[in-house]
Amino acid sequence: MALHTAPMPWVNDENAASFVDLYELTMAASYHAHGMTGPATFELSVRRLPPGRGFLVACGLEDAVAYLDRFVFGADAIAYLHSLGTFDEAFLDALSRLRFTGDVWAVPEGEAVFAGEPLLRVTAPLIEAQIAETFLLNALSFQTMIATKAARIAIACGDRTFVDFSGRRDHGAGAALRVARASAVGGASATSNVLAGQLYGLELSGTMAHSYVLSFADESDAFRAYARDFPGNAVLLIDTYDTIEGARRAATVARELTAEGIAIRAVRLDSGDLGGLAREVRAILDGAGCEDVRIFASGDLDEYRIAELLAGGAPIDAFGVGTRLGTSADAPSLSAIYKLVDGPRGPVMKRSADKVSLPGVKQVYREERAGEAVADTIALEGEPGIVGRPLLRQVMAAGQRLAPPEPIDALRGRRAAAAARLPEAARALDATGEEYPVRLSDGLRNLVRELGG
């Protein structure tokens, strides 16, 4: 049998349009056959908040806009679709010339959002809006899930910092890049992923692995070598053999290297009773005159464990969070939907049991008093008399993006401000999802009744 030697394929600008479920294309072909080319509006929202979540952090919009901005079915895609024998030549010819020409409104990345609220609104010719469904759901639901998890970790950390360490456990290389970015939006101060740092301008953070220590005959020699190679930025992993003895050796090395002008920045704990060990290690470091050496902890951490450690008084200065951040382990998916709300027949709604959708083109308004968010209202676009600031902003017009990508620091700052404005109950790690009121406007309620809801 011949070995497959072709490189593993990736989703890229040239093939992203084909990142679509087959039924999007069969529906599009049928629309084309019936001349259904008029405008339609689809909205993307999340049906319900996952357990423990009192809010979500909108994220993934930049990928969505970039996808729509560069949307094209190239020659390879058309050739493949032709080979399926499913689509006629007229449709494939139309598909080869298809570009996104619609308008997009969205909640800015970093903003707090809630169940039922449109995060994204697409108004475009029906075929264009329909085909975009799969990619848009993938981009926004995954990154919103991760940004929300990171925001919860940031809440648990308080004035401490945390770093994204998740790349090796994430569900694919592409996912790891998006995790690094979404984690930064959610509050991570840095990532260990070098490519993410390069692509998104993120701060990088790294320590050493146990394999580094094991490569030296003596633990202290490993510490000395690393600190001399990276003076002023050395974080020493002290639990390869015995954590307490490792702390003593790190303190000794730190004192020795002071004469060379080299400072140990931190020691890292990665196993065992992190709270108890942190107290013992802090005492050893302080007793050796190494009060400036910080304690960094990692090892199966999440917001719950971090909150527990800090509530117990653990003297930990920063955290590395991996698997449970990059997979949002306790809530690994969002019930995201992308539904037609206004189409060839005007406003429409789905009335399936437990899967009702809200009809009409909508806007979300947030009422704030004394700097605190008090309620959201989902209303029809242009409906008069609604109190609050509108959350959805136009980001594309006639297929063209209206602004360049926002800097990560701006998104991180928006998330911090949005979370700070939420009621404390909504920010709690054990929230039920009912702590913050989201209302329907009178106009929207009337439309639901008119359509039999």
Image (tube, rainbow, N blue to C red):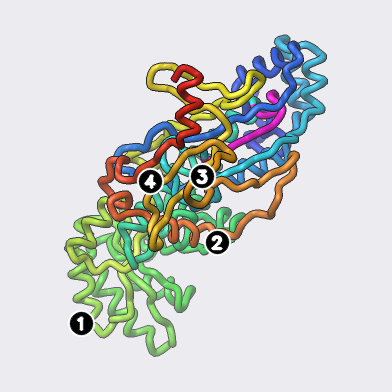
Comparing marks 3 and 4, which lies closer to the viewer?
3
Q: Is residue 1 visible?
A: no
**Secondary structure state at the residue bearing disc 4:** loop
Looking at the rendered structure, the kind of residue marked 3 is Gly
**Secondary structure state at the residue bearing disc 3:** loop
Callouts 3 and 2 close, C-beta under 8 Å: no
**Pick the front one: 222 or 247:** 247
Comparing marks 3 and 1, which lies closer to the viewer?
3
The x and y percentages for residue 392 are 56, 45
Q: Which residue is mark 3?
A: 385
Quarter occupied by residue 153: bottom left
Q: Which residue is mark 2?
A: 410
Looking at the rendered structure, the kind of residue marked 1 is Gly
Q: Which of the two labelled residues, at mark 3 and mark 4, occupies the earlier sequence position? A: 4
Q: Which residue is mark 1?
A: 287
Q: Which residues are magenta?
A: 119-129
Q: Disc number at residue 55?
A: 4
Q: Is residue 405 left or right of residue 117?
A: right
